[in-house]
Amino acid sequence: MKFSAVALLCLLVVTGCCAPSSPPPQQGSTPSTTSGKTIEFLFSLLEAHAKKEWGDKDYVEAGKHRYVKYIDGYRTRAHIDFDQGEIYVSTVSRWSAKDKLRKAIVHTLLMPADPKDAELFSDKEAVISGQPFLLGQVVDHEGQPIRWEWRAGRYADYLIANKLQEKKLKNGNTAYYVKIDMVSDHLEQREYKYASLVQAAAKRYGLSEDLIYAVIKTESSFNPYAVSHAGAYGLMQVIPKTAGADVFKLVKNKPGIPTKEYLFDPANNIDTGAAYLYILKTRYLRDVKHPTSRHFSMISAYNGGTGGVLATFDKDRKRAMSKLNATSPRGVYNALTTKHPKDEARRYLQKVLYFQKEFTDNF
């Protein structure tokens, strides 16, 4: 990458470390009321069903960096921790537990690369089709990638025969489970899956590829199934009624808002997230004069909203913009990472810049 943001980041490390007159809607933190109620309802419904089987203490739900899928009347689940590179497939079924576990292992290993039919909020089984999402990210006991059902079934039999564990849950049920370690470069493999989509979006919206990569890694660890209570979906955690609506209106000239199925599609998600970064850069934050300060502000606004960026400098928007422009890029970085109204947004800018430098060095 060739702009001064990374150079400034290097200095900061060495020394210690998508416009209308009203603030644009916030992307990635607080959803609109309708959007929030919809996804909160889905989460609450899932929680109510699953806790009947797993109890309060052992219930696990899907998140930004975590895939969780319940099947079999919510008695069997798959849990992928993309940060740790660990997969747990478990069941609390009292009948034919090994059979239920075997089926869940096979379905997890062959889960589709396209998450639009994932059925994350119900116990309905996802349709197995196409190339498995985990292909190459997991190998069987013979060190072979798992593409076909026969190999997945054979590996499931091996795991149940040799790696089966059990755990007494707090609610009195017994869980039977296996743990599967992902390969060491599982994150890099997911990155490569979306290289062409990132390249196309970067070219389309005049953004650097490493910025898009860094946002995806921060938002989801390249988990296309990512969801959050904020109402965000997919790789770049786009909220339909905020960032999605802005992109449809201001970039795509389309009515309405994107559906969750639309945003679960990796190509649509990366395009929408990149388009929102473009909106932040060229519309909502166009009055930020220094390109590096604008870069920092754009990243911070992707998570905490343009209003949060300006509120860091002053409650009045015009005075805030004047103060921001009167501050050096280093000062803007320091303010956004120490004085932003929201702790999450402070950490967000640090993470994205760190990952952006990482991708810049690697490409």
Image (spheres, grey):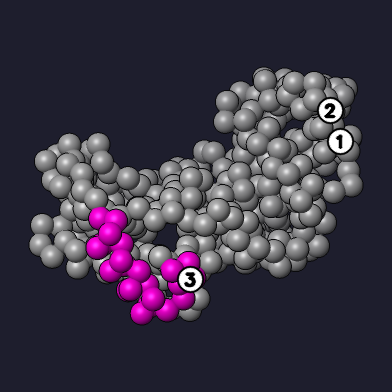
Residue 144's tag is: 3
Identify the image quadrant of the C terminus.
Answer: bottom right
Q: Amino acid at mark 1?
A: Ala
Q: Which residues are magenta?
A: 142-164
Horizontal side of residue 150 vs 53, given as left or right: right
Cβ atoms under marks 3 and 1 closer than 8 Å:
no
Location of residue 58 with respect to 310 vertically, above or below: below
How far is the residue under mark 3 from the one under mark 1? 42 Å
Horizontal side of residue 235 vs 96, given as left or right: right
Residue 258 colored magenta?
no
Horizontal side of residue 52 vs 156, given as left or right: left
Q: Which residue shows up at 31% across the image and 62% down it?
A: 159
Rendering quarter of residue 198: bottom right
Circle 1 SS class: helix
Label 1 neighbourhood size at 10 Å, few (<14), some (14-19), many (20+)? few
Cβ atoms under marks 3 and 2 closer than 8 Å:
no
Q: Which residue is mark 2?
A: 11
Query: As rendered, which of 32 and 51 lies closer to the eye?
Result: 51
Q: Which residue is mark 1?
A: 7
Cβ atoms under marks 2 and 1 closer than 8 Å:
yes
Q: Residue 39, how many percent across, how many down?
A: 40, 50
Label 2 neighbourhood size at 10 Å, few (<14), some (14-19), many (20+)? few
Labels 3, 1: front one: 3
Q: Residue 147, how many percent across, how many down?
A: 46, 76
Query: As rendered, which of 357 and 159 lies closer to the eye?
Result: 159
